[in-house]
Image (cartoon, helix red, strand yellow):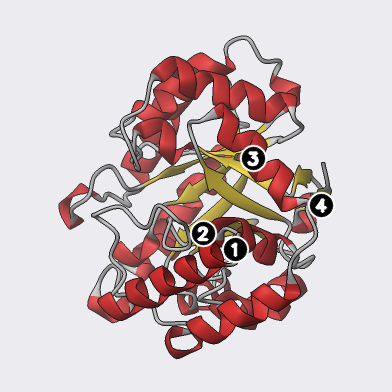
Amino acid sequence: MEYRTLGRTGLKVSALAFGGSSLGSAFRAIDENEGIRAVHTAIDQGINLIDTAPYYGATTAETVLGRALRTVPRDRYYLATKVARYGPEPKDFDFSARRVTASVDESLARLGVDYVDFIQVHDMEFGDLEQIITETIPALQALKARGKVRFVGISCLPVRLFRQVLDRVAVDQIQSYCHYCLNDTALAELLPYLRAKGVAIFNSAPLAMRLLSNEGPPAWHPAPAALRAQCAEAAAHCRARGSDLGKLALQFSAANPEIPTHIVGTADPKRVLQNLREMHEPIDHTLLAEVQAILAPVHNLTWPSGRPENN
């Protein structure tokens, strides 16, 4: 396992991190025992960063993860969760200091731990950035001072929002998703800025929430039709070449040494082992160039998320 340093936190984390969304049945209905085995397999193979959220499966993911971690020594993993998003609709967000403070205690209880290493504002594009800067983040910083969290972070889809927030308030970490993968590398433009600030980077969904896979995206995926079509063409091309688009996508993202860790969600122990194996195989540069050419017409094509003013 390769370990990389997370910005100024000084923590060394595995290049592949375990994403907890699958434990909440985000992509398919799961067997809880299988999900617990997936967590144990990941930790036994050296994956030491686990990311989850109350939103995943309406707290199911945190609950299942908590059961999985009962038998695991706390010093074997770093744990990240989130606040402010609790459902799929705009009404399900609450960025108030009162709610995020209570949310951390609720997550600690579900996870069965005394503290989390990272607490993140979840999908901040759905909130008022002024409130997030002046109320939400200070409330989380207060929890850091009390020892309930070690580091405070932010997450969102629109990449430009990271700079807008970080220009005004200091945080330890960001989580970006679907913006450093084969079809979209918008996060790359922000890397020098984040490096200068010493901000830790989590790159989530290097397979673009399964757009870059043989299985294809789930029905709820918000990608526009043109993006779906090009990704499907890229998957078919990889199959014709005896390869797999998901494997290529994971290898591509993990190859960037400026991004310390890449979060992939799965509740399948066999898939955990497969991801680790494929991540460390040599990349097929000819195939990579061919796939990038297929995806060039939709490069950095994304979708709206959150409030109109935040897009």
Residue at position x 31%, y 31% in the image: 29
Q: Are marks 4 and 2 in contact (CB under 8 Å)?
A: no
**Amino acid type, callout 3:** Gln
Residue at position x 40%, y 22% in the image: 63
Where residue 19 sits in the image (x, y, percent)?
53, 41
Where residue 99 sits in the image (x, y, percent)?
32, 40
| Residue 148 in view here | no
| Residue 42 in view here | yes
The residue tagged 1 is 249
Of tags 4 and 2, the one toward the viewer is 2
The residue tagged 4 is 4
Compared to residue 282, the image places residue 82 above or below, namely: above
How far apart are the two marked residues, 3 and 4, measured between alpha carbons? Answer: 21 Å
Query: Is the residue marked by circle 2 packed among few (<14), some (14-19), or many (20+) residues within 10 Å?
Result: many
Q: Is residue 15 left or right of residue 124?
A: right
**Amino acid type, callout 1:** Ala
The total number of labels drawn is 4
**Amino acid type, callout 4:** Arg
Q: Is residue 117 left or right of residue 3?
A: left
Please tell me which residue lies in front, 5 or 273.
273
The residue tagged 3 is 274
Where residue 122 sits in the image (x, y, percent)?
41, 52
Of tags 4 and 1, the one toward the viewer is 1
Of tags 3 and 4, the one toward the viewer is 3
Q: Earlier in the sequence, mark 3 or mark 4?
A: 4
Of tags 3 and 2, the one toward the viewer is 3
How far apart are the two marked residues, 2 and 1, measured between alpha carbons? Answer: 6 Å
Q: Earlier in the sequence, mark 4 or mark 1?
A: 4
Instruction: Identify the residue at the far bottom of this view.
Output: 297
Instruction: Identify the residue at the far top of this view.
Output: 71
The residue tagged 2 is 207
Look at the numbered disc 3 and give the secondary structure of its residue: helix
